[in-house]
Image (cartoon, helix red, strand yellow):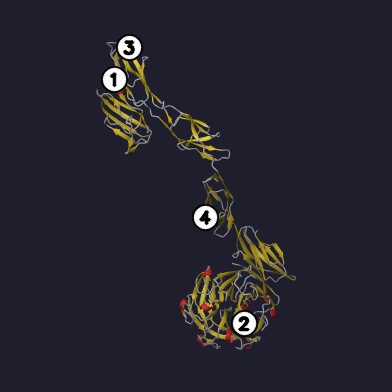
Amino acid sequence: MLMIVSAPFWCRGQLVVTVAGVLEVAGQRDGQAFEALFNNPHGIAVDSSGNVYVADRFGHYIRQIRPDGEVVTIAGTGETGRADGPALEASFNEPWGICTTAGGVLYVADTRNNLIRKIENGEVSTVAGSGNYGTSDGPGQAATFGNPTGIEIDSEGNLYIADHLTHIIRKIEPSGWVRTIAGRAYTPGDADGTGSTARFFRPYGLTLDNEGDILVADEWNHLIRRVTPEGVTTTIAGTGEIGDEDGLGIQASFNYPWDITVDDEGLIYVADGYNNVVRRIDDETGTVSTYVGTAGVTGGVDGSGPDASFSGATALAYWPLANEIYVGDAYNHLVRKIINVEDQRLGLQLLRPSDGILCEGENLSLRAVPATHDNYEFWIDGQLAQQGSSPDFSSDELGIGDHLLQVRTRNGSDEIRSSELRVTVIPAPRPEISILGDTIFFEGDSVTLIASLAEAYLWNTGDTTALITVFESGIFQVEVRDQQGCFGTSREVVVTTQQEAEAPAISFLSGSELLCPGEEAVLQSNYSEIFLCYLDGWPIPVATVPTLAVDTVGIYQLQVSDSTGAVAFSAELNIDRQPPQIEDFTAEQRTAYVDDAAIQFRSQTVGVASYRWDFGDGESSTLQDPQHVYTATGRYRVMLRTEDEAGCRDTLVKDAYVEILARGANPSIPSPGAADSAQVYLPTAFTPNGDGVNDVFIIRGENITEANLAICNQWGELVFESEDPSVGWVGDFRGQAAQASTYTYVVRVTLGDGRKVTRSGHITLIR
């Protein structure tokens, strides 16, 4: 709320000054006071903050003149109509009268629409009237009016209406009920009386005096009337004849009085229409005097007392805080005011902020009223802040906390002071920006910026959300508004995007994508810079040099950084390993005598390029299934070595596998068919790929009568189990192909002589 605090200052005279508009130029133009245009400003009101509201009759607008002189349209489209809704989309038809509440709600007498309208929170609504011409009382929009002109509201929310063409005074209760309180519809006259016994002749403007009675400018009777809330009507001034005579009440004369207002001392002011003057009535003595202007003189001259002139003073509104009277000078298309320097006050007007709450760093704007003194001193917290002839003061340097403001002036040796005005400065918000991600990234990536909690946000990108995602380089900053309406700006966040480096190439310095068992490959990059190598998506801690030896199967990828810090990744390189080639080999006889027939050896491995047997006695063979005759006694180590088409080799060694005896000696190695746990054989790997080679993991051996095979994965889950020695594992789990990995097995067999053998170990499933 705009505030004024005052102290008395005495001098003489009344001064008329133009507030807004261009003399004798009609139009609708907002802007600074003396650039704005009005079109027959008929109704006028002023709120406690010093905002002046104008019913711009022929413009069909409602206008506002702010304390800083800015004129803005607050309601109406400029076209005739009766539409409610958002203020600037609503329409009026020659609004004549206007009044305002302490809370800033406006009521408008929409004359040619025969409606009473309300403007609140930017919305226009109809309070009363159906839009039809008439005099019907009743609930709100069921009632009718006959060109309502004057309008005023009391402290209890009752509205009073001068129903111009029907010659009656109406009341709208807070409930919305409309009733006639004085005069008889369609019956003009000038009779005093109660209720319908009273007579009016086109009552125009009205106001409330300090006792709550209604004062009426009875236009065509040329009278000033008083109506009590009970409807008792009396005449207080005017002869009933056209004239301009001053004097005691009923001896004075008027010439079509249009509007009326009352100051805080009870003095009555009348816009005496065709006399083009403003008259004053001392209600205690009944004396009528000409206040400003000269009867019969038209014009738009500013000045003091009789030197001032008007052309159609149709509306009056008193502003008690500055002891000023605002005038709607309709035919000059001006808004003017009368400064009553006979009872002048020194006040401090708070232009900004209007509610006395100032945000840190926000501008404080003060104005001394009236602006007619030669000197002003502005004091803040007991310290002189500014002195000189200017009535205006502004500053954006007040610290956080409460401050007491005062204006002073000097009249000779006397110092006049306003009352102190309190202003509170509250801290401005200090928003922070949280960063999710890196502010330096490659093109195509992004970073998320999140502002700290606030009521509203405005980024320098134009975004109005708390969170934004940034894809490009730039400097980013956010302004926020907190719940108190204060604004604050964050620090800057710099975001930089980079182009990715040229993708590296990964190649083999040695080795290939398919490693032989026990073999390793050496990888290299075409980058001379250090690179980082990943295996299956995980960095290899030591892999930071341009070459790298690897012996683990998996997917390899290189990451390189160039001299600018740009990063790029190579294509993926998949390295696999050949499975072991040799499943097993057997001998048809493991015990023989010197110079016996040849022992038959059989390889369980097929599909290789070459075989090489070492029989342990210095002899060898390259056949797949060779025969060999031992010529000396002993226990012999047998080795089989194979090589495939890719050059991968595999070796299987069985120590003390064959025993050669002298004739008549007892064997230490059982012959085939004997119960011996060494005759249970299990492979170390298998490849269930359907090629017919090493597709099944199965127990192999001689003289096995019973068997149990159980296989578990690395998490201890049972993957396969069989009680049949002829049934092996084909590499499935739960109806699906099991993952290539290493599994644990446990084998329990029963041999032909009843002995039981248990084996456990690991089997590698290769795909």
Return the x and y of residue 126 as percentages of the image width and height: 49, 74
Return the x and y of residue 662 as percentages of the image width and height: 30, 11
Q: Can you say whether 384 is above or below 141 in the image? A: above
User: What residue did someone put label 3 on?
Assistant: 631
Q: Can you say whether 102 is above or below 731 in the image? A: below
Return the x and y of residue 728 as percentages of the image width and height: 30, 31
Q: Which SS class for mark 4?
A: loop
Judged from this view, the residue extending furthest toward the top is: 663
Distance Cα–Cα, label 4 vs label 1: 85 Å
Distance Cα–Cα, label 3 vs label 2: 152 Å
Q: Is residue 289 left or right of residue 646?
A: right
User: What residue did someone put label 1 on?
Assistant: 588
- Closer to the chain start, of discs 4 and 1, is 4
Residue at the spot 56% in from the left edge and 40% down from the top edge: 565
Number of the label disc, if any, that sits on residue 491: none
User: What residue did someone put label 4 on?
Assistant: 465
Q: Which SS class for mark 3?
A: loop
